[in-house]
Amino acid sequence: MTPAAATREKRNLAATAGRWSAAHRRKAILGWLAFVVGAFLIGGAISQRHLTNAEMGNGQSRQGLEVYTAAFPKQASEQVLVQGRDGVRAGSPAFVFAVEDLVAQLRNLRYVSDVSSPLARGNHALLSRDGRSGLVSFKLAGDEAQVQKRVAAPLAITADVQATHQQVRVEEFGEASSARALNASFSHDFRKAEYTSLPITLLILLLAFGALVAAGVPLLLGLTATLGALGLLGPISHLIPVPEGMVDSIVLLIGLAVGVDYSMFYLRRKLEERRAGHDGDTALARAGATSGRAVLISGLTVMTAMAGMFLAGNAVFTSFALGTVLVVAVAVVGSMTVLPAVMSKLGDKVEMGRAPVVARRRASGESRTWAFIIDRVLRRPVISLVLSAGLLVALALPALGMHTVDPGTVGLPRSLPIMHTYDRIQAAFPGGPTPAIVVVKSRDVTSRGVQNGIAKMTEAVVRTGQIGIPMSLVVSPDRTAAAISVPLAGTGTDSRSDAALSTLRTRVIPSTVGAVPGTTVYVMGLTANSQDFNNTMKSHLPIVFVFVLGLAFLLLLLTFRSVVIPITAIILNLLSVGAAYGVLKLIFQDGYLRSLLGATNIGGVIDWLPLFLFVILFGLSMDYHVLILSRIREDHDRGMSTADSIAHGIKSTAGVVTSAAIVMVAVFSIFATLSAVAFKQVGVGLAIAVLIDATIVRAVLLPSTMKLLGEWNWYMPTWAPNRLQPVRPPRGRHLPAH
């Protein structure tokens, strides 16, 4: 080893932290346990502050919801479908008796108000055109959490009326009832993912290490890091609120993945050093100075990528950034502190509980399969580069035709009974379950001028042919706001709905109620939310890209003292992300293998997924890239030639990278089995990208690119500061790794 390289190893932060941890094992282990338990208990006691629906929105739809929320009492809109069976129509006695029974019982409920019957005069919009169906609408008082509990009473009445009146169908759908059913479904899905991921991860780790104790260490770090991060999220969420349930799942997904990865990198290097003949303390110190340093750099790079979501312009992405940066930071701290202490405490007992066949194979050193592949890649780097890059470009090309959509209710699990109700309401009352809401704000919305403007808007929407007759108009108690429910053509998120919304916003409203002096008009609802969100993503995406790529470049530049390494790393990672986009488009938009996954056709890729996948995949790709490059650079600093350091560095890390990737692919794939199409797309996108990255990119594209670049890999302009100049190994020396 060169003196400069040796000095850097001794002085790096990870090595110092590892030495302290090994020397103060009791403090490190008890301190970590105290932190995790304390954070989890405090987080549970404080609980999380959740984003409101308005805070999760963008643009005009967010402004409209803020006005609506401030002006109107907190309440949820509910509808009960009453639909005749076997020839029973709206005027039939069976239909009338069922509606009257339902309305009478609902009006007796404490938190129910504004019950509207399709039988009442002037409520013809609540009767379907075919005369078979009617809607009983009502309001349920309370905030988002309260209405999900209070809706149990109307649901019970609906079930009772259905049991009494068999000649008609009686089913409820609305904001509170759907949220209640979907939250129960998602909670079941998350429990399934948690219970399935842990044993699968343990099994893969057992195959990776060949010993039960060694397999349990990474899993424990991943779990404790996740619990600690979730605990910290409680108090922090009172400063930066998070969406209910969503961030917890992302934290679990990323925390388990990186926690397992980092401990695998560290532990495998320690075992490797022991097998090379070093005593336990020396092996642990060398692992800290090398793999520990790689973990620290990797964690910083991953956090840099995740932080890009802070600039996405949406509160949900801000909370995603908070959760992912937090859990990666906790995992890195755990890797630097408690992990060396645990390894020092266990010593060689870390290999207890050996699986004989697997253990013997792991003890043999480098993976023969990867060594075989990498040798041939390095022997023919041009062919390998052209073929692997060509394959990734071919996979990425379909992404050029990717269409992003807000799945709305279409993307929700169709197996749920409440979604069957939604489909029946949508068929009988197109646009009814998810109408646009026109919010009118004025000093007095009951004044003649505002009312005339609303009447003109009603006449104008009917003439368009794209918009239905307004179903309801409500005025706030202080008369400063009015809300008009306007059905749009289409499903709510398709091109017909988008066109209808555009007509409403740009043609109808400006020429009618929007022209009334002193009046401000907003349009909100599912279609408006989707369109405003997409516009925000389009305007902020370039900012996120520049931030993530720019900071990643600087971090890798400072770490590897080369301008070529960061550029190639960014290009390779973008190729793997592009390939993942292309596969997503082929599956979920074009339909290849979609039925095999049991996914609903929503017409494209979910609108928030491309940006989310970019930052997550870029971060996770850098995870492997930093580990491999750190080993290559380490060997090069020891005196190996560039060609030899590439071969040895990639071969020696191929096993741990493959094992870590298999863990990630397995955990992510579990999400592809969940019921909602959003989870399926996230799971497939992450799993495919990690698989591509750990195989084609790391085993073929990376070595062939570095082999062709040769000494240019370490290029740094001569005018750069001395501390950025690369360490030059002694000329003519080709030292072994140990």
Image (cartoon, helix red, strand yellow):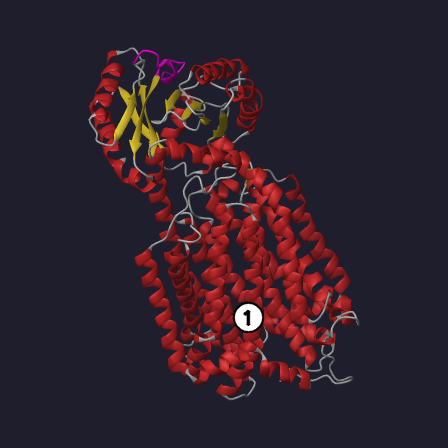
Q: Residue at x 60, y 81 (%)?
A: 9
Q: Taking the image as drawn, is residue 233 in sight?
A: yes
Q: Is residue 49 above or below residue 477?
A: below
Q: Taking the image as drawn, is residue 361 in sight?
A: no
Q: Is residue 476 above or below residue 566?
A: above
Q: Depth check: 333 or 378 in front?
A: 333
Name the dominant secondary structure of the magenta segment. loop
Image coordinates of residue 552 in percent, x first then y, are: 63, 61
Image coordinates of residue 309 in percent, x first then y, are: 55, 52
Q: Is residue 68 above or below residue 207?
A: above
Q: Is residue 178 above or below residue 510?
A: below
Residue 115 placement: quadrant: top left
The single residue placed furthest to the right in the displayed view is 718
Which structural element holds mark 1? Answer: helix
Q: Which residues are magenta?
A: 120-132
Q: Which residue is mark 1?
A: 296
Q: Is residue 127 magenta?
A: yes
The local crowd at label 1, few if under 14, some if 14 to 19, many if 20 or more residues have their Cα within 10 Å, is: many
Q: Is residue 553 magenta?
A: no
Q: Amino acid at mark 1?
A: Leu
Q: Residue at x 52, y 17 (%)?
A: 512
